[in-house]
Image (spheres, rainbow, N blue to C red):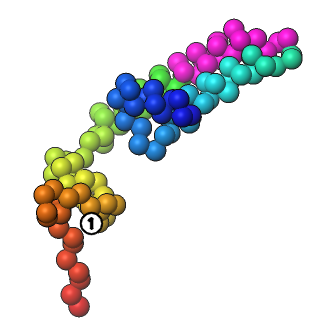
Amino acid sequence: MVFAVIAFDRIRLDDPVGAVSVHLACGIWGTLAVGIFSTNPEHTVLKQLAGIGAIGAFAAASSFLIFFLLKKTVGIRVGEEAERDGLDYSAHEMHSYEVQVGSAPAHPAPAAAVE
């Protein structure tokens, strides 16, 4: 996983929680490791590569179809203002972290409710 994180950083793939490194890279390695280290003659590297290719093709095709249908029906983007302000703030009126620009916070904290 560590090597995958470094590689994805080098190709500038945004993977802030390491999900691609864990599930894609480690999944491929785990599948190939069966073909490399198994003592069962039916578990060959070639069969494992075919399985990786089949699962990759299925995942790519089904993801494309799902996102295409979502884009054409309900949309998959938020508005410009929500994108600029950040989804933490636009959806929950709070920030997961404060970004400092100069000496002032980038976004003011939401006002407390007055009863």
Q: From the viewer's side, name the closer residue of 107 and 105.
A: 105
Q: Quadrant of the N terminus?
A: top right
**Residue 46 highlighted magenta (yes or no):** yes
**Within the image, what quadrant is residue 15 found in?**
top left
**Residue 37 highlighted magenta (yes or no):** no
For residue 104, side relative to residue 7 (left or right)? left
Percent of width and height locating residue 67: 38, 33
For residue 15, side relative to residue 52 (left or right)? left
The answer to whether residue 27 of the structure is visible from this angle is: yes
Characterize the local packing of mark 1: few (<14), some (14-19) or many (20 or more) Cα atoms within 10 angstroms.
Answer: few
Q: Residue at x 24, y 46 (%)?
A: 78
The answer to whether residue 24 of the structure is visible from this angle is: no
Q: From the viewer's side, name the closer residue of 18 and 114.
A: 18
Q: Residue at x 19, y 77 (%)?
A: 111
Q: Which residues are magenta?
A: 41-57
For residue 106, side relative to residue 88 (left or right)? left
Q: Quadrant of the C terminus?
A: bottom left
Q: Amino acid at mark 1?
A: Glu
Judge whether 94 appears above or below 14 on screen: below
Judge whether 39 appears above or below 3 on screen: above
Helix, strand or loop status at disc 1: loop
Residue under label 1, please give it: 93
Judge whether 14 appears above or below 48 on screen: below
**Within the image, what quadrant is residue 28 found in?**
top right
